[in-house]
Amino acid sequence: MWGGSIRGRITLLVTMLAVVVLVPTGLLAGSMVRHAVTDTVWHDAQRQSNAVAADVRAGRLDGTITPTVAGITLVQVVAPDDRILAASPDARGLPPLTSVWPRPDNPQMNVRACPPGGNPCLDLSALRVHPAADSPVIYAGRPAGGPSSQGMFDWLFAAEVLGLVLLTAWGAWKIAGRTLRPVEDIRAELASINVVHQGNRVAEPPGHDEIARLARTVNNTLIRIEDAKLATEEALQRQRQFAADASHELRTPLAGLRAQLEEARLHPSETDLPAVLQQTLHDVDRLETIVTDLLLLARVGANPSGERRPVDLASLAEDQAARRLEAVEISMTLEAGLTVMGSRTHLSRLVANLLDNAVRHARHAVRVRVYRAGTSGELSVSDDGAGIKPADRERVFERFTRLDTARSRDRGGSGLGLAIAREIAVAHKGVLWVEDAPEGGARFVVRLPLAAPDGLAGGGPDQGRSQPAEPLADGASAARTQRDHQGGTGLDGREAPGADRSDGSREAGRGRQRIQRSVECPAS
């Protein structure tokens, strides 16, 4: 118990310290008490001997001496030839109490005389009456404490020291137990926490001492463990759902391929071979698109840092818009000089996916904007299509998510484009969200940290602009965010002052597409 318990070890340590302190202290105190008693006896003996010496000098001494100091019972007046000239009743008939004879230059001495034969020792004061050679000597004193009384004194002191040591040990045991009781409570509560009761927490004692800080640290650790467990469960659930969706997405074109090829093999004469080959190539293209997107998602997730080079957002948006061949008008408002650090390949894919999504769902027009937002750069792609319900604005970034027919991916998407776009944005320390577009459709906004002048990425994407708000109780999207007025848009989608500082525009026709471009130059 003592060796395996902190409480026991504390008690043992305090007890040992008490022994180390109290035993020498007791011995010293006993010695001081004994010396004090002896000094008191000698002082009384000196008073008695001085009183008798005064009587001797005055010639008032007879054969019997009556002691006048309490406790001094032995008094003798001894001549130089050892004759007893006078004595107290207790000293009458005794030989001289000691053989010590004070010299003229030291007329008074304190002595302890121990006569032979085992008789008790005597504490005496020896006083020479006058310096003459025939001066008598006065002995006054009392028996010293014998072995029995001395032993009793030592036993009493030992008992007192032992009692103090035991009292100290008991107090240390109680105080340590009271101090460590919260630790035991924390241990017991931790032992009761399991998978069923994982939400339990340990009681936090009041105050700011070590025990209170330990309890708070334990609770914070439990919260992190629970959050990690929930995140792991969500990740596993997403992985299972992703595997199920991916298998379904791959199974559909594979089943179509198999059916067409079996039909052509069973009925070769009735088969339109060019049409079968065309459909087969279409299904293969769809399979290739899905597999390519899955591989890209895996690469971005496995290596989020990737290559890091300066990438101009305006140039990136212009290059991707120029590749569109659809009959949709694309208008661009680009602020020059906004450079981010990242992979141009991945960022191009991000912009391309947003443009593909906007073109696919737009009725007539798509709008692309690049502008500064504090220490970040923002790129927005909006369309005039059906829009996205607030409740679905986070779901659209999930893999293989199906919405209603107005924004269905059956019009050419693989169901992975927006998931890839968000994964790339997060890998570049950015954010991507969707909100209502001024044109009435959906507006996708990606925010990325701008590169510092030395080529390193500047502040995070949340510096200078607030994060998109958390989901509201009525299902409003987390994408809604408070906008600043540095060339951005307000909550109602209207342009903020200074947003359209264009220095010219041009139209470039490519197929049936029309691109309108205006460049915003930063103020000097």
Image (cartoon, rainbow, N blue to C red):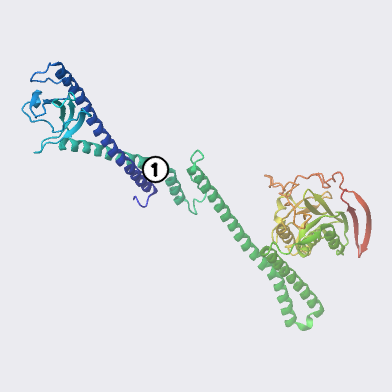
| Apparent side of residue 524 relative to residue 246 in the rendered image (left or right) | right
Residue 81 x/y as whole percent: 9, 29
Find disc 1 in the rendering and name its residue.
Answer: 176
Residue 140, above or below 351: above
* Image position of 216 (left or right of 34): right
Examine the rendered structure and indicate whether residue 289 appears above or below residue 439.
Answer: below
Q: How many marks?
A: 1
Q: Residue at x 79, y 53 (%)?
A: 377
- Give the image location of residue 472, x and y in percent: 69, 45
Mark 1 residue crowding within 10 angstroms, few (<14) / some (14–19) / many (20+): some
Q: Residue furthest front?
A: 133
Residue 193 visible in the displayed image: yes
Q: Amino acid under label 1?
A: Ala
User: Farthest residue in the bottom direction?
Assistant: 269
Residue 443 seen in the current view: no
Q: Is residue 75 above or below residue 259?
A: above
The residue tagged with tag 1: helix, strand or loop?
helix
Q: Quadrant of residue 163?
A: top left
Residue 143: give x, y in percent of width and height.
15, 31
Tell me: 424 left or right of 63.
right
Location of residue 407 (image quadrant): bottom right
Q: Residue 161 versus residue 282: which sits nearer the camera?
A: 161
Question: In the image shown, does 299 or 149 lie closer to the viewer?
Answer: 149
Whole-percent x and y of residue 226? Answer: 55, 52
* Furthest-left residue in this view: 93
Q: Nearer the viewer, residue 277 or 477?
A: 477
Height in image: 158 above or below 251?
Answer: above
